[in-house]
Amino acid sequence: MDLNMNVNPPHSMGTTIIGVTYNGGVVLGADSRTSTGMYVANRASDKITQLTDNVYVCRSGSAADSQIVSDYVRYFLHQHTIQLGQPATVKVAANLIRLLSYNNKNMLQTGLIVGGWDKYEGGKIYGIPLGGTLIEQPFAIGGSGSSYLYGFFDQAWKEGMTKDEAEQLVVKAVSLAIARDGASGGVVRTVIINSEGVTRNFYPGDKLPLWHEELEPQNSLLDMLNVPSPEPMNI
């Protein structure tokens, strides 16, 4: 067995990112694992980045690429806000990311989800996957963990959810992806955006629901020998 793991490749978000609209705003959610090849470089990174007071972006793919796109867009939106004298809309923020992603699609490896609330259109979610396509969606999922979630969202998502229902859906979905995807893990962070402002919530990894064949948190690896099998998944 080759134990010479390469710990020098570019930092990758690995990632599960989610954006969901509800009756009154949006909920964004993400895990917190940043990997460098097989090595976890950061187990508690924040993948939900503020662009303006009312717009946030979830980042996946190359950490460097997603950070520089976010920094450029934040700067442009600041200038835009000064010129107009009012906050930028969610659509303007998403379109700026689309322009940067599409015009540099041969060099960037990042998929983003933009979510926010504005007085013209309310809560909106936009997905900008690799290549720079802009897609408005009632919910968007991205990152390596998203492939485990499409069927779950087809079954669980519904129109007109309350704020609490939407946040519970996001936390449940991220925990399901963490259970199956080796590149997703750590904690779950959520951001709720509506007409009243922004609320950030934090869910530690040991407080997340356990799914099929996941083990309870242990103080010692030896304790795992006596751990019973978890209950079957109930969605």
Image (tube, rainbow, N blue to C red):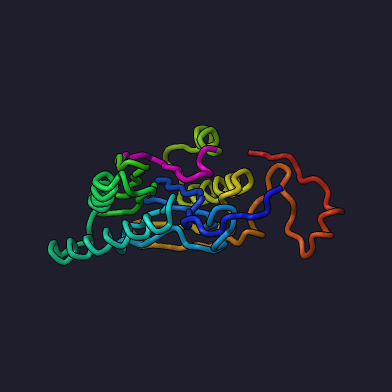
> Can you see residue 121?
no
Can you name the residue that lies furthest to the right here? 226
Q: Which residues are magenta?
A: 135-147
> Can you see residue 161?
yes
Residue 185 % position (x, y): 59, 54
**Horizontally, is 98 left or right of 64 in the view?**
left
**Horizontally, is 141 left or right of 224 in the view?**
left
In the picture, which quadrant includes the C terminus?
A: top right
Residue 118 % position (x, y): 27, 54
Residue 136 in the magenta stretch? The answer is yes
Residue 224 quadrant:
bottom right
Residue 15 % position (x, y): 50, 50
Residue 127 % position (x, y): 36, 43
**Horizontally, is 117 left or right of 10 in the view?**
left
Determine the residue positioned at 32% across, 39% down: 135
Determine the residue positioned at 43% across, 57% down: 63
Can you name the residue that lies furthest to the left here? 83
Residue 40 quadrant:
bottom right
